Amino acid sequence: MSQAANPKPSLLASLMAFPATIWDSIFRNPVPSNDLERSATTFTNFFLHIHPVKVHKNSLRPAYTLGLGLISFWLFLILIVSGILLMFYYVPSTTQAYDRMLDLRGTVAFGNILRNMHRWSAHAMVAVVFMHLCRVFLTGAYKKPREFNWVVGVILFLLTLFMSFTGYLLPWDQLAFWAITVGTAIAGYVPVMGKSIQFLLMGGTSVGQEALLRFYVLHVAVLPAVLMLMVGIHFWRIRKDGGLSRPADADATPDMVMVDPSKAVLEPRKTYGIQGLVRGPLTKVGQIPDNTVYSWPNLFIAELFTFVITLSVILVVSLLFGAPLEEPVNVMHPPNPAKAPWYFLGLQEMVSYSAFWGGVGVPTLFVLGLILTPYMDRSPGGVGKWFSRDRLLANTLFLTFVIANVIFVIIGTFFRGPNWAFVAPW
Ligand code: HEM
């Protein structure tokens, strides 16, 4: 009887249905055409399920996030893919590394564009992650309940810097060698442990084969693994913290009276039975506007858009500008001046005034200040708005540090010549 109801399909019909059968075994839902399917697709797809089924409209406002967190992630992804491809060719040896760079530039298929993409994405990631940090600070998004995710973010920023720094040595040219010599010397200014940290990093007293191997292992295995784990925690926490921050009045209707949460007098906690809640005269169900939209397609289109833009910009820049490669390492001829990578030039500039304060004191205070910010600034006001008046002091202090550092980086990059003397760049 069951055979009559479900006749066995013919061989031809099975063959014809073959592609659809395979497709259906991987993707359990059709391309969504209604809300139920939109939810099911987000929920059941491995790559999409980290997203919520619905997001608040405020999270999709480009003017709020500037897409900087996403762009940081896409750059990281481009770095992983291009980095793995480069690993098929690169050898972390002082006798081979530089020649491999020349081969990548000259003979390996797509070697040059791959190297350019890797290099420019790395610089871009340092800059974009820092800009993302600034956006989070200036919108007060580190406040409760996002304190811990802010700390995870600070760790991500330090990891990004360290990833870029360890990669800098790998081409084994003059630029790499002397930039890392200067960079590791800065680590040596740490009181008591400085020389030990320097020794641990370099595997000796100067930059050589041991340092190259250590930087390589850190760069291709240790740091990316830690960074991936921390990015996973970062995204998971965004979900657990209720999505992105938004202003307290983001869901207000014109007839709602907004209360400043810092001045609100809360009634002692009451408990209600479920029936009491449902029957009570104050049930507000349906009165709060629903400002959420489905992630499919709204959020996913925004994500795809930022990815396409990021990849296109990196591709165009990599086609137009070659990654630098100077003369092979010559330990007898340091360039004058020997400069650290640009993101550490602010430190190098400060070191020229005071080795301890510039290299260790100020950066340590800055990082500690960043980590402790959400635990010191406990007022709930000003979240979800750029440059809120409620946060005038915090934003002014933060921007003073940022602008001072940017000025130091500009001075170090363009206005410092031989013997670190002041020169005009023109
Ligand atoms: C590898 C580096 C990083 C990646 C890939 C990343 C990624 C993201 C993404 C995709 C978002 C959501 C969209 C957005 O806000 O743009 C986000 C939000 C957030 N990020 Fe990051 N981030 C990184 C580093 C940082 C840093 C350095 C900080 C701060 C020190 C930080 C703190 C936060 C916080 C607190 C949020 C929630 C913001 C809110 O609720 O408005 N992140 N991050």
Image (tube, rainbow, N blue to C red):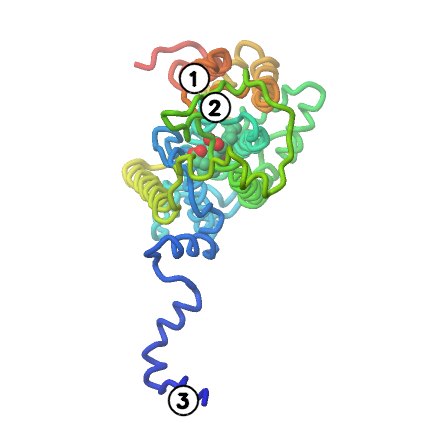
Q: Which mark is residue 383?
A: 2
Q: Closer to us: mark 2 or mark 3?
A: 3
Of the numbered discs 2 and 3, the one sitting upstream in the chain is: 3
Q: Name the residue that disc number 1 marks.
A: 388
Of the numbered discs 1 and 3, the one sitting upstream in the chain is: 3
Image position of 16 with respect to 126: above or below: below
Image position of 273 with respect to 88: above or below: above
Q: Residue at x 45, y 23 (%)?
A: 139
Between 186 and 126, which is closer to the camera in this rendering?
126
SS type, badge 3: helix
Q: Would residue 250 appear left or right of 331 to someone viewing this image?
A: left
Residue 164 in view: no
Amino acid tagged 2: Val
Is ligand 1 within 8 Å of the beta carbon of the residue shown at mark 2?
Answer: no
SS type, badge 2: loop
Q: Would residue 200 appear left or right of 424 to someone viewing this image?
A: right
Give x and y (percent) for residue 242: 51, 37
For marks 2 and 3, give the CA distance: 65 Å
- Of the 4 image quadrants, the one containing the N terminus is bottom left
Give x and y (percent) for residue 175: 45, 30
Q: Name the residue that disc number 3 marks.
A: 4
Q: Are marks 2 and 1 in contact (CB under 8 Å)?
A: yes
Amino acid tagged 3: Ala
